[in-house]
Amino acid sequence: MTRILAMLIALAMLSACGDGGSSGNPISRSATDDGTDDGTDDGTDDGTDDGTEDTDPGEIALEDVTRITLEGDTLLVEGLSLDGGAPVTAYARRADLDQNGFLAYVIQDDPLDRYSRAYSAADNNSGSVRGSVVATGGQFNKIFNGVFVARDGDYDPPEATETTGLVSYAGGYVGIMNIFGPTPDLVPIDPDTPIEVVPGGVVLTTTGEVFINADFADNIVNGTVYDRVIVETGDDLPSLVLAPTDISENGEFSGTVEYSEVQPVYSTEDVGNGSPGTYEGVFGGPDAEAVAGGLVLNNNDGQADVLGFEDELEVGTFVLDKCGTAGATDPICDQTNPDFSR
């Protein structure tokens, strides 16, 4: 797909001028973290990353959030700064903004507060795992964002036999970037409001597909995030690899994200072979019938910045059903071993 950098510039101008938003594009992630983690984790962590120290077993919180839960049509977000006045902020359902199987939720307290958007989904089988991602729009040079994934119940891995130990998972991914996009959702504001006060625009959304292979005999997981695209512009993003990493006794994992050596859109020379970030996740359900995870990417358009982004940050989540189960509808599962019975 032809790269249209001018489109992104126009979107930034729309955010800055069309609604009086901040002109930063991109802007810093938060007031306390500049988002410059080099993503050099060697992928051998046992799944006990210190980002989970304030969560329960089977829960993983990344970046600025501490917990995200769903009650009816309301998403409850804890720990994200400046998205609402209560310790637990209630986000309203917005079905028209749903992406790639993920349900959308929004909040903006008043015209001079940040606009925040979240996406959340559970697996199609027992609903035992859920992944959620959230980000505020920009204001005063900063955004806040985070990912939360969780499992209901204990970890129940499949029995490791010739037909059940090596399995595959497939499903969707959704992410949010610290780059401004169109701002149709912002609460109307007095046009005479000083531009320094006005909240910035809505940050861009990314989608993709995820395929994971897990070996429950050796407790290793790896995979890929592909067909990545920026929803608002249609621009493709480089494909990624979830480098092999250990599955812990609790069914959690933590590893390194790499640029894939197979790039259908960009040259591998432009994308490079480094690491743009890290990933974490958790298996859940009977016989580990589903998996959810989160990504934190500090450079999502390759080492040569094929889309012209600099200092960008993307946070995202995936929720996948195990191939061969009733909830696994991705056609790619047709090529996998379907026998997972004990």
Image (cartoon, rainbow, N blue to C red):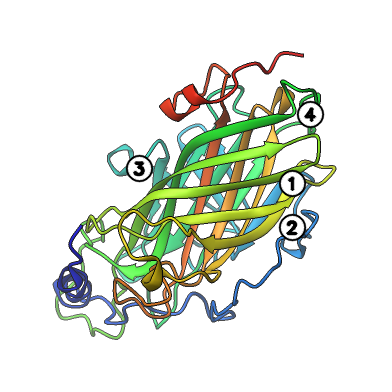
Q: Looking at the picture, does residue 157 appear above or below residue 191?
A: above
How many tags in the picture?
Answer: 4
Q: Looking at the picture, does residue 35 appear above or below residue 152?
A: below
User: Disc 4 or 1, which lies upstream in sequence?
Assistant: 4
Label 4: how many residues lie within 10 Å, few (<14), some (14-19) or many (20+)? some
Identify the image quadrant of the C terminus: top right
Amino acid beneath label 2: Thr
Q: Secondary structure at mark 3?
A: loop
Q: Pointer 4 and pointer 1: residues touching (CB < 8 Å)? A: no
User: Disc 2 or 1, which lies upstream in sequence?
Assistant: 2
Amino acid beneath label 4: Asp
Amino acid beneath label 1: Glu
User: Disc 3 or 2, which lies upstream in sequence?
Assistant: 2
State the residue at coordinates (34%, 65%): 267
Q: Which residue is mark 4?
A: 156
Image-quadrant location for residue 100: top left
Q: Nearer the viewer, mark 2 or mark 1?
A: 1
Q: Which residue is mark 2?
A: 52
Q: Is residue 105 visible?
A: yes
Identify the image quadrant of the N terminus: bottom left
As drawn, is 281 to the left or to the right of 131? right
As drawn, is 29 to the left or to the right of 197? right
Q: Which residue is mark 1?
A: 252
Q: Secondary structure at mark 2?
A: helix
Amino acid beneath label 3: Gln
User: Disc 3 or 4, which lies upstream in sequence?
Assistant: 3
